[in-house]
Image (spheres, helix red, strand yellow):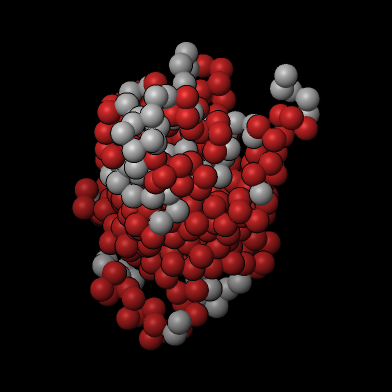
Amino acid sequence: MFSSVAHLARANPFNTPHLQLVHDGLGDLRSSSPGPTGQPRRPRNLAAAAVEEYSCEFGSAKYYALCGFGGVLSCGLTHTAVVPLDLVKCRMQVDPQKYKGIFNGFSVTLKEDGVRGLAKGWAPTFLGYSMQGLCKFGFYEVFKVLYSNMLGEENTYLWRTSLYLAASASAEFFADIALAPMEAAKVRIQTQPGYANTLRDAAPKMYKEEGLKAFYKGVAPLWMRQIPYTMMKFACFERTVEALYKFVVPKPRSECSKPEQLVVTFVAGYIVFCAIVSHPADSVVSVLNKEKGSSASLVLKRLGFKGVWKGLFARIIMIGTLTALQWFIYDSVKVYFRLPRPPPPEMPESLKKKLGLTQ
């Protein structure tokens, strides 16, 4: 039992084995009285906790698969829930003369399409963002461990913000390739009246008109929109969680109940800055996917500085709420499936010695 827990501690990229074992109360095993076989005697409650705490090993295939599943739920469900707001935002971006603001946009949409019209594009939204969430969260965990192993324990701690930025950017690169086809179909459905009402109608029509290009011509501006957003989303979240447990929460995370940990997750997840960073590219994506035969540079030139900021307020509301809910759902999945959850980063013992911080 002890060997499996020790292996898990060694796999943790944010802690040293010694600190993790002491943190878990396992560092005193060597000083405990020997058992019948001459091995240190384990307290029964620690052995039981080790069995019940985790459902899989950190960094295992099952761990990454469940993280990906958490991403599917967190992105697919949340983006589908805000389809009405996303629809109005997209229409404000592609036709600002008609849809002058959020409330006006809702009013015009309800008048022309009725209540059902607010749900246009829900299918490609759900499918596209579910695939994006699978790659975004699943690959983030993969790249975070991969880059951590490349850096080594001390550099992982010293350069952890850069690690978060690199891992999230790498994950989002692949996530956007998965998202692009459904994002293109969604924009056509939402912003071109009479083009198509469902994904079943839109996809064949787009392929017939432009081939595969119709589904991927927006992937470059999608990278421009999503990669900076995701980098800010993950790096800000990771450092905010670290700061909350260090300066705000009056006790270590290991002593917090699961509901308390999820509250910290939700608070840390409400990162409005992400929406501002990625909004200009979001405007280009919306216009580019609506029009045939256009390019990102032409769209950007036509919109100008003022045009790319249309719908920003709607995006701030949407992205701030989405980000918080996504982290909450993702962390809830980890709690539900009892996945290993490394504690906030701590300085490795070897680095403390180098810096003269130990006696």
> Which residue does the image show at 60% across and 31% down from the upper left?
346
- The image quadrant that residue 300 belongs to is bottom right
Find residue 325 and report its horizontal and vertical position in percent. Answer: 37, 38
- Residue 111 is at least partly visible in this image: no
Judge from the rendering whether residue 105 lies leftward or rightward of residue 241; answer left or right. left
> Which residue does the image show at 27% across and 38% down from the upper left?
52
- Residue 142 is at least partly visible in this image: yes
**Image quadrant containing the C terminus:** top right
Find residue 310 and report its horizontal and vertical position in percent. Answer: 54, 46
Residue 298 vs 87, above or below: the answer is below
Find residue 241 and report its horizontal and vertical position in percent. Answer: 51, 30
Residue 57 vs 30, above or below: the answer is below
> Which residue does the image show at 47% across and 38% down from the upper left?
342
Front one among 138 and 110: 138
Front one among 313 and 42: 42
Front one among 320 and 246: 246
Find residue 112 and report its horizontal and vertical position in percent. Answer: 28, 53
- The image quadrant that residue 295 belongs to is bottom right
